Image: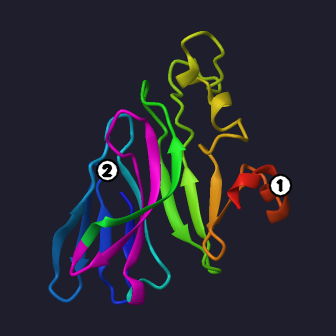
């Protein structure tokens, strides 16, 4: 569960099963204001929420979730909140993150805007740490890819288990995997992101 608080003290909170709630400071009531169709197995579901820095004027909020369907993936999407409801038709998918759903675990995610207006995205490694006898989840045996973090957190070409920054001003995705790179280096590594 993650929360987002408006400047007026109203509180959005989310459930992993896809419901977005709003606590209204004036009425002291909580109401569901939207529901996404999510895949909620294996730690997936509705995982993150944050409000746009200009939420008071534009009504935009961002959600990190696992859309239901045959293709295993996570979305970072922008929605508009109007008339006390999440406008599902307003969805703009900003980022799709491939994932696996054969085994559970570590599909966490969180969203937050930094003081400069950049959207920070934290993503889990989508690797099952079990059955490793206390060792790191590194398992190169056949049919064990879901237990091998080398394909996600140790792979600089994979978005899982990374801190990402979605730069709103130019709509450029910059990745910061475990170490801090200059923006120029990150753009050079991912030239299609411009």
Q: Which residue is mark 1?
A: 188
Residue 88: image tag: none
Residue 125 falls in image quadrant: top right
Residue 20 falls in image quadrant: bottom left
Look at the image and tell me in which quarter the N terminus lies: bottom left
Location of residue 148 in the rendering, given as x and y in whole percent from the top left corner: 61, 24
Looking at the image, residue 7 lies above or below residue 133: below
Foreground of the two, 124 or 169: 169
Compared across the picture, whether 190 is left or right of 11 comes to right
**From where the camera sits, is residue 180 visible?**
no
Q: Residues in magenta?
A: 57-85
The 10 Å Cα crowd at callout 2, few under 14, some 14 to 19, many 20 or more, is: many
Looking at the image, residue 21 lies above or below residue 68: below
Do the residues under discs 2 and 1 have CB atoms within 8 angstroms?
Answer: no
Q: Looking at the image, what colour scheme do you see? A: rainbow
At numbered mark 2, what does the secondary structure look like: helix, strand or loop?
Answer: loop
Q: Which residue is mark 2?
A: 16
Residue at point 41%, 35% (across, down): 71
Location of residue 165 in the rendering, given as x and y in whole percent from the top left corner: 64, 63
């Amino acid at each position: 569960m993650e929360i987002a608080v408006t400047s007026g003290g109203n509180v959005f909170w989310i459930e992993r099963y896809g419901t977005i709630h709003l606590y209204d400071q004036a009425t002291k009531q909580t109401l569901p204001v939207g529901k996404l169709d999510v895949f909620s197995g294996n730690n997936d579901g509705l995982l993150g929420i944050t409000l746009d820095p200009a939420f008071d004027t534009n009504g935009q909020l961002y959600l990190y979730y696992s859309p239901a369907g045959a293709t295993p993936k996570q979305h970072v999407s922008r929605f508009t909140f109007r008339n006390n409801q999440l406008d599902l038709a307003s969805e703009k998918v900003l980022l799709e993150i491939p994932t696996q759903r054969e085994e559970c675990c570590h599909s966490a995610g969180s969203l937050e805007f930094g003081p400069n207006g950049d959207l920070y995205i934290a993503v889990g490694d989508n690797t099952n740490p079990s059955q490793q006898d206390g060792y790191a989840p590194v398992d190169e045996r056949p049919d064990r890819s879901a237990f091998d973090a080398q394909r996600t957190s140790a792979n600089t070409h994979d978005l899982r288990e990374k801190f990402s920054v979605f730069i709103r001003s130019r709509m450029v995705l910059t990745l910061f995997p475990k170490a801090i790179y200059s923006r120029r280096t990150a753009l050079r590594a991912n030239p299609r992101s411009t």
